[in-house]
Amino acid sequence: MTVSARGRIRLWAGLVFATACSSGRTSAPSTTPVPAEGSAATEAPAAPTSAGGIPAAYRLEAPEWWAHAIAQGTRTTTGAPGPNYWQQYASYKLEAELNPVLKRLTGRGRVVYYNRSPDSLPVVYVQAYQNLFREEAKRNQQTPKLGGIDFDRVMAEGKILSSVAKPTEPGYTVTGTIMELRLPKALAPHDSLVMEFDWQFRVPSETAPREGQDGEVWFIAYWYPQLAVYDDVNGWQIDQYLGRGEFYMGYADYDVKLTVPTGWLLDATGTLENATQVFTPQTLARLDSARTGTTIVHVVTEKDKADSVATTKGADGKLTWHWTARNVRDFVWGTSPRYLWDAARAVTDSAKGKITSSSLVSAFYRPEAVRSYWDEAARYGRHSVEFFSKKLWPYPYPHMTAVDGPEGCGGMEYPMLTCIGGTYDSLSLYEVVTHEIGHMWFPMMVGSDEKRYGWQDEGFTQYDQSQAMADFFKGFDDEARNRDYYLRGAQAGYEEEMMKPADRYGNDQSYGIAAYWKPATVLVALREALGRETFEKAFREYGRRWLGKHPTPWDFWNTFDNVTGQDLSWFWKEWFFETWKLDLALDTVQIEGDSAAIVMENRGKAIMPVPLAITREGGGVERVMVPVSVWFGGEKRYTLKVAAKPAITKVEIDPEHGYPDSNRGDEIWSRGRAASSVTPTSKR
């Protein structure tokens, strides 16, 4: 997201909330969660359930389009792509020149679109994202209004298309941020289409979301006509770009030439093909040291900029940079005459103590940005790439670069680049760097529809961010912070269901809860219920199955059900489709002969298995997992009987605090006092 969302969400979380809070399963595997790994947990006996297992209120029903995809063989009930899965592809050959005096970009390009679908396509759709900045544009965020993209030439299969052609004739129409191309003849299945475009636009100012320029740095995004996604579940996905909702992009190859003034540094998606033509021998030597060494290398310093020894001279005051990228979902670039450049090698995979793959991690920043710890950004980036490569799967790209950008960038992810604007302390800069780098896995490698299911990339990355922060800042609990933001926001009335398109939320606060904090929090709850090893196995398998593809939420859910061997539809329904509250509580612990009866209650509507820690005299702790099925019949109380000896001194629900329980104070019983009903107001 951008400073108006991701960046500012962090700010208002501590401010707005503080003031506001003053007032499609076809199979049914086991529903019993496994005990947490590494504990001495035992499993409580399951209570009798109603016929049919999971009650209707907690059952997940698949939509019609999902059933159709199953019938067509493009999706499966196991969560893996079906035998008939297909997706479109494209190849872009683009050229662009930036005129910083006029603040104008001019471009031209040839695009080949490969129709791998079984359908004949009489029209194709192209994204014209820059039209968000037209005066008349529909928007749900504040943006500059400096004009949109102007098309000087549009061609398909060698024929000029006109914007004033009749609707029944070949031509094109631009409506908001979507261009419709009516083709001279329909694009047949397994055929290809060649299109050509000439275009230009004014680069928006620093208040633009996710991109722009401030007169010193230029981050150029959404700058070319990009094909919309045509897939097996939506057909054409042509939702308008309104500002808040992010993107759904197809995979493609890129061959790009970018012309900027001599002396400017530039980084972009992909591999620089003409490094020896744009860099001096000194810069090339330092780059080589960064790629092979173990330390942070200052590739371009302030002195290098002053002496003009970072890049070659070019011709007529200009220098052209040639980049290529394969199988990525977008292409972006950042450039400035003021950038310094730090770089280091990140190890992305190894075997038997030997490095088998690595990537160059860079930071491009202005000298004064050291006040926001940008001189540490390359180190932060290296840790993030290496951590996620181990935690998830190896980073596959040739480089990863953090770019000091205009204010409007906030923190925004692109293939191999992130644009970060604003001021930070050391913790918050690491946080935004690791979050944006985490997006290289979701949605860059696993290409979900961010606009309709924001949680499927933002929530996953927020969860991954927490794991990275705990590793880098030993003992820092970002999971607790996410959980606190979610619960405070819900209490303040901002919570809306997660299964809603981003642009349909009432405000950025509600979107922030649904896309970031709630999904990150419920993933932790699911991990607590399943056990870390099982959870992480399923999470990685989902990514492995859908690398370079377009998963839906049902593919994610079905993968978890398949890998765990459990029907978790009750979990998906209550947390993703509803705004139900969780409130598990301990009522009493009574001695009945040789047994102790532990009486627990479910005081909310959400249901979860109940992890118990039973402490006995002598300090021994017994772990018990009460299965979620005890609540399936609508019961609000459940009694667990355990041995009375050694004497019980304390019982606690969810001792790891992994659940988003709305009333944490009623989950502990200790000998001599009953469970408290007072809700703590301070963060854990």
Image (spheres, grey):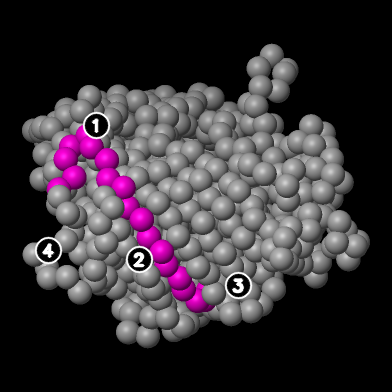
Q: Nearer the viewer, residue 507 or 323?
A: 323
Disc 2, SS: strand
- What secondary structure is the stretch in magenta mostly built from? strand
Q: Mark 4 — residue?
A: 169
Q: Nearer the viewer, residue 491 or 169?
A: 169
Which picture quadrant has residue 555?
Answer: top left
Disc 4, SS: loop
Between marks 1 and 3, how big is the CA–CA gap? 44 Å
Between marks 2 and 4, how big is the CA–CA gap? 17 Å
Q: What's the mark number on residue 85?
A: 1
Between marks 2 and 1, how big is the CA–CA gap? 35 Å
Magenta-drawn stretch contains 190: yes
Lower sequence index among marks 1 and 3: 1
Q: Which residues are magenta?
A: 186-204
The amino acid at mark 3 is Asn
Q: Where is the C terminus found, in terms of image quarters?
A: bottom right
From the viewer's perspective, is residue 317 above or below residue 345? below
Q: Position of residue 157 (x, y in %)?
A: 26, 50
Task: Judge the density around disc 3: few (<14), some (14-19), many (≥20) Cα neighbours within 10 Å.
Answer: some
Q: Mark 2 — residue?
A: 153
